Image: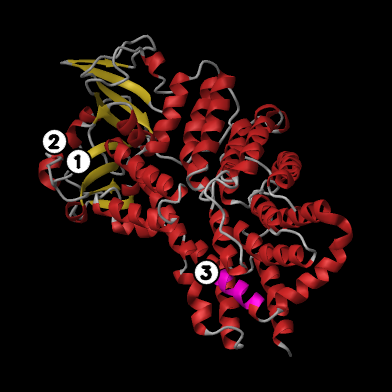
Amino acid sequence: MDPVTILLILFALALVLFATEWLPVDVTALLLLGALLALGLLTPKAAFAGFGSDTVLTLASLFILTRVLLRAGVIEWVGVTLARRARNAGSMMRGMLSAVAGVSAFTSNTATTAVFLPVVTGLARRAGIAPSRVLMPLAFSSILGGTITVIGTSTNLVVSGALPATGLKPLGFFELAWVGLPVAVVGLLYLFFVAPRLLPAQDAALEESLRAYLADLTVAPGSPLAGQTLRETGLGRDHGLIVVAVRRGSDTLYAPGPDFRVQEGDTLAVEGPSDRILTGKSTLGVFSKSEQKLQVEGAAPVRLVEAVVLPGSPLTGRTLRESRFRERYGVSVLALHRRARTVERLAGLRVQVGDVLLIQGSAERVAALGDYLTVLGDLTEAQRDLRKAPLALLLFGGAVITGGLGLVPLSVAVVIAVALALALRLVSPEEAYRAVEWPVIVLVACMLAFGTAFEQTGAAKVLTGALSGVLEPLGPYGLLAALFAVTVALTQPMSNQAAALVMLPLAIGTAKALGYDPRPFVIAITIAASNSFITPLEPSCMLVYGPGRYRFMDFVRVGTGLTVVTFAVALLIIPQVWHF
C-alpha cells in the first residue's frame, strides 16, 4: 500500500476518533504520531519537531500568564468595578458581557468564563434576572472575544504556528481583528437583544454544593465599604456574603438591618462560600485579624486548606481563642463551616466535631496539624492578592505590546514574562506547571507533525486535487462559504484546535489548486473553528451547562442563530480585507 493511501486511512480514523472521543483527543493524537513513526512516514526529528516549536512554547507561556492574572485578582476586579458603576440592570449585564469579550481577547476564554461565572450570577440576582438568561451569553461572549487577537484562543495560535510550514506568513497579532471585532460586536448585539428571548428562565445551581463558612472580616482604612449602608455595599447581592453580626469596639450587633452604616474598624461576621470570602478579602478592603497577626515579612509561602475537626480533638467545646489555636498550631483560621448554621461571630463560636475550618499557614505547619484535624482539600490557588495586580498587568501588558508590535517575537515576549513572573513569585513553579493545559499542548504538537507528513507524502496534493474538482464550480465565495460551514460542523464534536488543523491543509491546497490566494480561506477557518456555539461541548459552554440548568437543545436553539450571524458577517468582511 502506497504512503498516500496509508496516510488518508489514518486521517479518516483520526477524524472518527476526534469526533466520537472514544479516546481523549490527546491520546488519539499520540497514537496518530506513533503510527506515523512506526510506518516510517515521518523521521523522528520531523515527528518531534512540533514539541519544540514556537507555537507550543507560546501556548504554554500564555496559560501560565493567564494564571498569573487570576492569582492577582485582576479579572475579578474588572467585574466588581463594572458592577459598582452600572446604573441599571440592562446596562449592567451589557457592560459585563462586553467586558468578558474584551478580557477574552487576551486571555483564555475558558479561564475568563470560570472567573466571571460567580460575578455574573450575583449581578443577575441583584437585577432580578434569572441566571439562565445570562450564563450562556457569558460563555458565548468569551468565545466571541477570542476571535479578536492571535492570542485570544489557542486555536488562533495553532493556526498561526502551522502557517510557516505551508509557505504562508503567521497571523499578525491584530490581523484577525478586521473580522473578529465586527463578528464580536454583532454577536454581542445578538446576545443582548435576541438570546434572552430564546433562553429559559430558571434558577441557577451554582452554589448548591458550596460550603457556607462564617468569617470575621475587619474593615480597613480606605475600604470602599466604609461610610456605606449594608444595602449600598451590595455584600449579599453582588458578593454572596451575608452579614450576620457586626462588632464595633466592645459592642456587638447581631443581624444588622440593611440601613446599618459600616465604619472603618468594624469587624463583620459574614457567611458565604469560601471563594466569595477569599475574593472579598482581596477586593473589598477587609482583612482577617488572625491572618494579619500570623504574617511575618519574608515568611515561607502559605497554604490554604479545609480541615475537619475529628472526635477527641482538644478543640471541641472551646472557642479558637480559648484553645490558643494560633499559638498551638502556628496557623490561622479564616472561616468556619458548620452544618447547622449559627448566627454568631466566629470568635465566639465553640468548636464542635465535624466543623470544617478554613486554615492558612506554612506548608510545614499545615502538614503538622495533628491527629484530630484532617485536611479535606487544598484551596491555595483560590487565593487572590490585588497587591500583585499592577505587576501582573505590567508583565502581561508588556508581553502583549512588545510581541504585538513586533519588537520581539511573541514567543520570546511571553517566555520572558513567564520567567519574570516566576522570579518575582507572582506564581509558584508548581502552580505554573499545573496551569498549562497539557492535553492541548500534546494535541497541537502531534497535529503539527501530522501536517508535515500530509505534505511530505503527497497526500495533501491528492486530496486537495479531488476537492478542487468538486468545489471549482462554486467560485471563490462559494468555496469560502463551504470551507467555513464544514469547519463549523467539525468543531462541534471535536476540539477547535483539531478541527482547524484538519481543515487548514485542505483549504490551502484547494485554494492554490484553483488559483486563489489562500489567506482569506485561512482566516475563515480560524474564525469558524472558534464558532462552537451549537452544542455545549466547548469548555466554556460546559462550565455554564450545569449551573444554568440548561438542556442540550437550549444550546442548539440559541447557538444556531449566533452561528448564522457570525457566518454572515465573516463572509461579508473577509473578501473585502483579504482579496481572493
Can you identify the residue that label 2 sits on?
293
Badge 3 amino acid: Ala
Which mark is first along the chain, 3 or 1? 1
- Across and down, in percent, residue 574 comes to 71, 46
Lateral position of residue 389 relative to residue 361, left or right? right
How far apart, in angstroms, are the residues tagged by discs 3 and 2?
49 Å
Badge 3 local density, few (<14 within 10 Å), some, or many (20+)?
A: many
Q: What secondary structure predominates along the stretch shown in magenta? A: helix
Residue at point 45% right, 58% down? 58
Q: Nearer the viewer, residue 389 or 58?
A: 58
Q: Considering the image in quadrants, where does the N terminus appear? A: bottom right
- 221 above or below 357? above
Between circles 3 and 2, the one closer to the viewer is: 3
- Across and down, in percent, residue 140 comes to 61, 40
At numbered mark 2, what does the secondary structure look like: helix, strand or loop? Answer: helix
How far apart, in angstroms, are the residues tagged by discs 1 and 2?
9 Å
Can you identify the residue that label 1 sits on?
332
User: Is residue 449 in the magenta section?
Assistant: yes
Which mark is first along the chain, 2 or 3? 2
Badge 2 local density, few (<14 within 10 Å), some, or many (20+)?
A: few
Disc 1 to disc 2: CB gap under 8 Å: yes
- 546 above or below 168? above
Can you identify the residue that label 3 sits on?
445
Residue at point 70% right, 59% down? 518
Lateral position of residue 517 relative to residue 435, left or right? right
Range of residues picked out in magenta: 446-455
Q: Nearer the viewer, residue 31 or 309?
A: 31
